[in-house]
Amino acid sequence: MLMMLAMLGMEVSYAADNADHDRARQAVEAGDVLPLRTILDRLDHEYPGQVMEVELDREKGEWVYEVKLLRKGGVLMKLKILARDGTILGSKEKPGKSHKPNDQGEPR
């Protein structure tokens, strides 16, 4: 019984993921959203780093990309980008963990 419930839960989640994917694809095809490749190419010039995660969500009636980048020095950056035209709505940075010496003056 538990196995069937778990399988049912996975199917519901999978169906929701497909619906989100279809909505996002339709938004790109309709011209309401810039393709992800276009957004990432623009970001690479101003915010070079490794893309860790990307989400496309609706916020206050607008499509918004949320992009997490791992930048030089281990800095994690989160950017919110208006998907319609690539305008950066905001950004946050979390500094990387530094390697501080321990009490004996040796690296950890």
Image: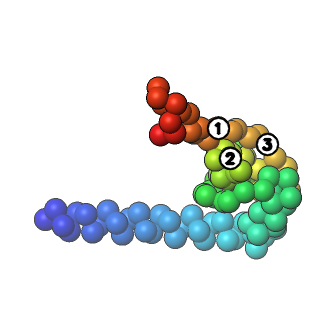
- Residue at mark 2: 73
Q: Is residue 50 left or right of residue 32?
A: left
The outermost residue toward the top is: 103
Q: Quadrant of residue 37?
A: bottom right
Observer able to see residue 86: no
Residue 104 locus on image (x, y percent): 46, 29
Total tally of numbered discs in the picture:
3
Q: Nearer the viewer, residue 36 or 102?
A: 102
Residue type at mark 2 is: Gly
Q: Is residue 105 left or right of residue 83?
A: left
CA–CA distance in space, label 3 to label 2: 24 Å
Residue type at mark 1 is: Pro
Q: Secondary structure at mark 1?
A: loop
Residue 108 locus on image (x, y percent): 47, 40
CA–CA distance in space, label 3 to label 1: 20 Å
- Residue at mark 3: 89
